[in-house]
Amino acid sequence: MAALDAPIVALTAYTTPMARLLDPHCDLLLVGDSLGMVVYGMESTLAVTPDMMVAHAQAVVRGSQRACVAVDLPFGSYQESPQQAFRVAADIMARSGAGCVKLEGGLEMAETIHFLVTRGIPVIGHIGLKPQAVHTHGGFRTVGRGDEAEQIMEDAVAVAQAGAALIVIESTYEPLSRKIAQKLSVPTIGIGASPACGGQVLVAEDMLGLFGTFTPRFVRRFAELGREVDSAVAAYAQAVRERSFPGPAECVGMPVED
Ligand code: KIV
Ligand code: NA
């Protein structure tokens, strides 16, 4: 077990094989609605559905033993009312076996977070840049300067007071992120935020170099697996075209030339 104040290590996971690879190293696996963009090629997360989240959450739960699995509530499935949020969250948890949910929002979601937490659903909050609100933010950008800073600090306090177990802070200026992390007693998980947060999360495909179309500044590429895949597939294609694959060892009863 890690020390009590050890930073929380989190990554996104969408599939069983990836969950198996990440689980031994992570405290938290997040089945993020970013899967809409990373897995399905969508331009935002807005069209992701609860059924998609359940399918991927089931896959991640099957592949994990150690880490806590959290699932994003997708856009449109929880903003209407605390009752709607409870119904959807309970359904996603029951069908997937995941242990908690994450939802985007600050002050406006405090009542909903409290409603869920007091009825047995652990909730991770998500403040700062809220990708489901990309159209009101005016794009994917760093937030929290000027008037925005005060609003985001209010969001942080409201989500913490509502009973969130953790709070993700996304794409928010470092000094504000740090101030929030230091002010709250609930742990914060940063993504494009601050090393002062109680933990960090990244999209696994981003930090592995597997999702090349756009890399935000806050991503560190710990590997370049996209390049590895490209050269492996090129080698396979060549072997097939020159008929050197399959070889004798990969066939049954193939006569070996002498
Ligand atoms: O959907 C997602 O992947 C997320 C995070 C990376 C926090 O919400
Ligand atoms: Na998300």
Image (spheres, grey):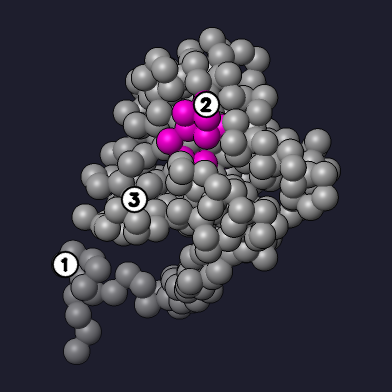
Residue 166 seen by the camera: yes
Residue 102 seen by the camera: no
Looking at the image, residue 1 sits to the left or right of residue 9; the answer is left
Q: For the point 62% across and 63% down, which residue is it?
A: 218
Q: For the point 48% across and 72% down, which residue is it?
A: 223
| Residue to which mark 2 is pinned | 162
| Residue to which mark 1 is pinned | 253
Q: Where is residue 159? Give x, y as percent.
A: 56, 32
Region in magenta: 159-167
Mark 1 CB lies closer than 8 A to ligand 1: no
Q: CA distance from mark 1 to mark 3?
A: 48 Å
Question: Which circle, 1 or 2, is nearer the viewer?
Answer: 2
Q: Residue 27: which numbered mark, if any?
A: 3
Q: Which numbered disc flags the more N-terminal residue, 1 or 2?
A: 2
Looking at the image, residue 61 sits to the left or right of residue 210; the answer is left
Q: CA distance from mark 2 to mark 3?
A: 23 Å
Which residue reaches farthest front? 183
Type of amino acid under label 2: Ala
**Residue 132 falls within the magenta-colored stretch:** no
Residue toward you, 158 or 40: 158
Secondary element under disc 3, as helix, strand or loop, is loop
Secondary element under disc 1, as helix, strand or loop, is loop
